[in-house]
Amino acid sequence: MDTDTLALPRTHYLNAEFGLASWLLTTDHKRIGLLFLGSISMFFVLGGIFAGMIRLELLTPPGDLVSDDTYNKLFTMHGIVMIFMFLIPSIPSVMGNFFVPIMIGARDLAFPRLNLLSWYIFMIGGCFTLYAIVTGGVDTGWTFYTPFSTMASTSNVMAAAVGIFIMGFSSILTGLNFIVTIHTMRAPGMTWFRMPLFLWAMYATSLINVLGTPVLAITIVSVALERAFHLGIFDPAYGGDPLLFQHLFWFYSHPAVYIMILPSMGIVSELIAAFSRKNIFGYTFVAFSSLAIAVFGFLVWGHHMFVAGMSVYGAMIFSVLSFLVAVPSAVKVFNWTATLYKGSVSYQTPMLYALGFIGLFTIGGLTGLFLASLGIDVHVTDTYFVVAHFHYIMVGGALMGYLGGLHYWWPKMTGRMYPDLWGRVAAVVTFLGFNLTFFPQFILGYLGMPRRYHAYPPEFQALNVLSTAGASVMGIGYLMPAIYLFWSLKYGPIAGPNPWGAKGLEWTTPSPPPTFNFDETPVVTEPAYAYDTVEKKLA
């Protein structure tokens, strides 16, 4: 495409209105998506700073950089910020808000004002959590395990818990909005099985958000009540049961893993199809696998509690169910691989992130099977093996998908391209840095190094140094997109409506889109990924 002849549309959603109030009071789903993008990017930087301090502390065996109390607060705040303030809201709130209405051919979400309210609720909850951080921090771990969180801890548990409780309502409102929008506002001709797989993923994620988040809210309120009034919910001295907390917490928090990873899977489906110029192999299986993951995700919380005193038979049931949840995940990976087979694959920046996602998610998924096995889980519970596993899923998987989607849709969101060479370099640097950071932690965990310790025996230092060096490389990989994407806002070449030659309604409207997305309601007449048709016409 000759970019010299392209021009930005005269009026689009970014310049249709001016002034701070036009952003703070907007009901345009695209602007709200950008508000979320700015907010979660700020929180990501904060969580990254905490992670850097943790890795610096672990460079040397003795705890010589920060005290043990400070270290406890660092990994707690890293977990809280990254999970509740970045990973969970990231793709649904940014790319879901921006693209769900456009991809179904609608002018906005079903409840635009509710959508804006979800951002304000998220920010209010975020402020409570930030207050907890700046006034001393929290030291319970992001899991808030009782009885430590309810009785022993003297840190700011209440403020952090209130912040997470409030942010949960933002997730529920966003999920409700997506479910109603997808059910009722699809363009003529867009049947369920003509929907892009990103929408299937967002639909499944929304179901988890709506059904699971209230359980977390109840759990957090229970912690607050127990801490304030000693009601005896979790305290055995008053007839309570501390294991009840773990059951409630993991009933939400294991499905929450899929809140983080399912949207990334949806993005990867879009990228694999677009950059291999093929229809997704087994579209129906990939679509239903999203729903299967959402359902199975609610049945496997017990595998977090194999060493907490569960009966052998109960543990066996949760072990089998944990293995079963791997099936729909494997369906996706196999079908993406089959789609790539004999495809016309181009290795542009979004595709590199998608391939990185598949590699890292596969390692994370396979090591998850180790943790679902009773005998191995007993050996590696609460070691760095677990840390490596969930980072391969939640960072290597979810974050690679997020960055892939951001690079894929950036031209649509801003109307401008970024330097693709720098994008490819950043994707490779991130992939290498990630593996150098977390793969040594599998070995550390296997050798028995416990997580959450700020000092460790000298024989573990070499692997920890490797891990810290990798974190530095990974940090550079994350910093690079921040620089060239900002650069592209002013100096990037004009993108045009469809720079990738991709399928989907979002590529049929100008870049950046007008306020109401489409001048006329589009009509869908073909499957979501009819690239085969395009290639035949070109031939």
Image (cartoon, rainbow, N blue to C red):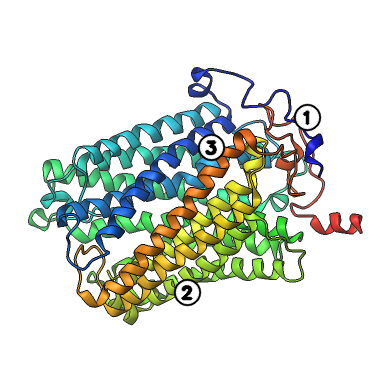
Between marks 2 and 1, how big is the CA–CA gap?
47 Å
Tell me the residue at 27%/46% (across/down).
Answer: 220
Question: At label 1, which amino acid type do we have?
Answer: Glu
Question: At label 3, which amino acid type do we have?
Answer: Asn
Percent position of residue 144, x then y: 24, 52
Percent position of residue 280, x then y: 71, 61
Q: Are marks 3 and 2 in contact (CB under 8 Å)?
A: no
Q: Is residue 35 above or below residue 19?
A: below
From the viewer's perspective, tell me whether residue 532 is left or right of residue 448. Answer: right
Tell me the residue at 69%/28% (across/down).
Answer: 514
Q: Is residue 84 visible?
A: yes
**Label 3 or label 2, whichever comes before in sequence order:** 3
Percent position of residue 167, x then y: 37, 39
**Label 1 or label 3, whichever comes before in sequence order:** 3
Label of residue 366 in the image: 2
Q: Is residue 215 visible?
A: no
